[in-house]
Structures are given as structure tokens and as C-alpha cells.
Amino acid sequence: MQLLIRMPDSRQILQFIESQAQQDFTYSQVGATRNQSAPAGFRVDHNRICLGQGAVVYEQAKQALTDWQHYRFDWLHLYRLDAPPAAGQTVAALAHVLGIWVLNACRIVYVLEETEPLTRFAFAYGTLPDHAECGEERFQVEWHPDDDSVWYDLYAFSRPNTLLSKIALPYVRSKQKQFARESLQAMHQAVTKKTN
């Protein structure tokens, strides 16, 4: 995690991403979100929203996820390659909170697309050393054959990675909950816009 009093420019963010791309994950259970098996000692957050029904809604949701539309907020910006998510890509999340800029690093762990037992598209990223938290987060869209419903599913496990994030845990938790709430809203809006 880097704390900055001024918003970093694109060059600084690129250097940050390049330096973190050489680092290892900060936790050993890499890929555990694939089957929602959080390791002991981590907090779990699991949030879902129904986006609608049918193949058209599923394809729209999948495209929205691929375009990172679930990550569009006023207070948090994602810096990434201009390409679909792929395992091994390193990304930087820049948050503006309490008057300072906080830069965190993650790497995409996996991308999956399945049709059994339900149709789903998902990817997850895990934390790198320069991140306030330690853990993994999965972003997934699902199409259920039994009732034709389409869902956006957000699953994460985390724990503090720095002394500052331990001290500020209540505030960190409130921002994690805000992220989940706004991510669900962003996906709902992305799909609703396309269907109207």
C-alpha cells in the first residue's frame, strides 16, 4: 500500500504496477475463491444480486464484467491493461479516502468459464505486497438453468496486511462493504442500461 498526498500520475502508477508484477501473492491459498473455500483466519464477504433472466442478460452481464464495469466508482479507480481479464495481469486500485490517495496492488489469479452445473463466467484477483489487505476476491456472473435467473456474485476473503489497516479496521471494513454495495449497483445499472 502506498499512501500519497497527491494523486499519482500515470507514469507513477505504471511504475508501481511494474514493480508489483514481480512480487508473490501475500497469502498461500491462491485460487481458494474458485470454490468459495476461505482459509482459516480470514473474514469472508459474500454478496449477490439478481440481474434478470435469460441468455441475453447473461451475455450482457458477462460483457460488463469483462469491461470491469463492476469497478466504476467516484472514490476508487482501477488501472489495468486495456484488455480482457487474464491470469497473471497485475492491476492497481487507487482510492481517495480521508483526503489521501491509497494505491493497492493485485494480480488476476484465474479466469474461468463453465457450463456445468450452471453457466458462469468469473475471475479473481489476489493481493500483492503493496496492498493494505491480504486475500482474494472473485467476481462472477451466473446463469441458473432451473429458473433462468442471472446473478452477479461477489465473494472475498481478507485480513489486514499492514499495521495501519489493523488500527483502522472498522473504517477498512466500512469501505469494503461500500465497495461490495456499489459494485452490485454498478453491475445492475450496466445490465439495465443495455436491456432498456
Image (cartoon, helix red, strand yellow):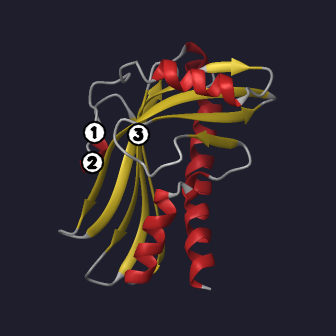
Task: Name the residue located 59 percent from the left edge and 27 percent from the top edge.
Answer: 14
Label 2: state its secondary structure. helix
Looking at the image, residue 127 lies above or below residue 56? above
**Picture quarter containing residue 48?**
bottom left
Q: Position of residue 37 (x, y in %)?
A: 25, 43
Q: Nearer the viewer, residue 149 or 13?
A: 13
Quick check: 95 left or right of 49?
A: right
**Residue behind mark 3:** 125
Q: Is residue 124 visible?
A: yes
- The mark that comes first in sequence, 3 or 2, is 2
- The mark that comes first in sequence, 3 or 1, is 1
How many labels, in total? 3
Inter-mark Cα distance, 3 to 1: 9 Å
Q: Position of residue 180 (x, y in %)?
A: 55, 51
**Residue behind mark 1:** 31
Q: Is residue 53 visible?
A: no
Residue kind at label 1, given as amino acid type = Gly
Label 1: state its secondary structure. loop
Residue 7 - label: none
Label 2: few (<14), some (14–19) or many (≥20) C-alpha neighbours in 10 Å: many
Task: Name the residue located 58 percent from the left edge and 51 percent from the top edge.
Answer: 71
Inter-mark Cα distance, 3 to 2: 11 Å
Looking at the image, residue 149 lies above or below residue 77? below
**Residue behind mark 2:** 34
Looking at the image, residue 96 lies above or below residue 45? above
Contact between marks 2 and 1 (CB within 8 A): the answer is yes
Task: Name the residue located 38 percent from the left edge and 79 percent from the top edge.
Answer: 149
Closest to the camera, between mark 3 and mark 2, is 3
Residue kind at label 3, given as amino acid type = Tyr
Q: Position of residue 3 (x, y in %)?
A: 68, 19
